[in-house]
Image: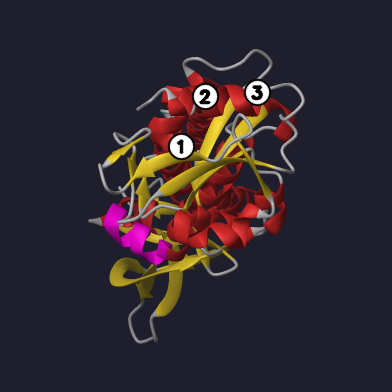
Amino acid sequence: MSETVTELYTDADMERMRQKGKIWRRALCALAGAALAVCVSLALLAGTENALRMELAAVAVSTVAGWIVIYGVLFVVTPLRRELAHAAMLRTEERQRVEGEAAVTDERFTIRKSVAVRRVEVRREGEEPVRLLVCASRAGALAGASALYVCHGYVAAYEVSP
Amino acid sequence: MRVLKNIFSQLHTFVLWLLASALFWGWIFTFVTDTVPAKKVTVYCRVPAVEDTALAAALEQDMPEGLRMVQVHTFDYVMFGTDAFQRGDIFIVPASEDPEFVKDLLPVDGERVKAYDAATGQGIATDYIQYGDEDYYIYLGSGSVHLDDGAALAVARELLAMK
């Protein structure tokens, strides 16, 4: 009976996350730059008669663009960067093997301020279940896992019996 | 749903950004739409209401050379700084308040010129200025920097031509 260890975060996953972060950062920078250019143009085009209209337009453009940038930074770029750091830790630090039937529970919360994780219980006959954590985005992969590789209480890899 | 939940979790940040944006661009536009006294003529009106932007734009259409803009303010604006009042170029004030201001003001063309006649309802720039129930007079500011170059007088004459 052969068992293969599957990493929760493969090299391809890490690269995909890096690329996604880079694309989002570039898009947000481009949006901020474009909004600034529009606002400066409005300021330069302002005259006595249209000053109020131009000012309101500049406030509207900078506010909406700023909101999008703030949202992107807080809820996309930063969580992605933190998940990447968390994944790098899982891939490099020492692991322990825990055998048993893994079951992902409904209990979920965030670590590192923005990385969503879920509770995993590894049940073994005659023993108390081992309580671990797994990144919410990877929790689905643990269905049917017969052994988990654990790093600081977080699932880093798993085995599935054929 | 998740987007809304995220937004509400950071609502204070979004509101703060809105305020910062309004304050910043307000400051920038004040800076952009203002200039030094030497390049503008300021008209102060002690009247119930004035369409300041429209009147300023109308006066700017035939502006004396060297000026960048004409500004029109109500007297409420003067409350923010007496310096603004002392540097004002043209004043439109009611007859009842004349003694209060006249010591700091100069007559246009050497004589006291009526800006609005309450008896006939005729006055200058009545499309832009809403006068009260009394006569109004137009003066030049004695502290105006445009007395020597004639710009204050030129804009005052332009106003008088708006009858």
> Magenta segment: does it hold A7?
no
Dot 2, how many residues are within 10 Å of its Cα: few (below 14), some (14-19), or many (20+)? few
Identify the mark at residue A55; answer none if there is no mark: 1
- Label 2 or label 1, whichever lies nearer to me, is 2
Dot 3, how many residues are within 10 Å of its Cα: few (below 14), some (14-19), or many (20+)? many
* Residue at 39% over, 86% down: A128
- Asked if badges 3 and 1 are on one and the same chain, I answer no
> Magenta segment: does it hold B4?
yes
Say whether disc 2 or disc 3 marks the residue closer to the N-terminus.
3
Q: Which residue is mark 2?
A: B157
Mark 2 vs mark 1, CA separation in Å? 32 Å
Instruction: Check contact, mark 3 vs mark 1: CB within 8 A.
Output: no
Q: Amino acid at mark 3?
A: Ala
Judge whether A30 appears above or below B37 on screen. above
Indicate the chain on which mark 1 is placed. A
Instruction: Check contact, mark 2 vs mark 1: CB within 8 A.
Output: no
Foreground residue among B96 and A38: B96
Mark 3 vs mark 1, CA separation in Å? 29 Å
Q: Amino acid at mark 2?
A: Arg
- Label 2 or label 3, whichever lies nearer to me, is 2
Among the 4 quarters of the image, the one containing residue A124: bottom left
SS category of the residue bearing label 1: helix
Span highlighted in magenta in the image: B3-11
- Label 3 or label 1, whichever lies nearer to me, is 3
Mark 2 vs mark 3, CA separation in Å? 10 Å
Residue A61 location, x and y as percent?
Answer: 42, 35
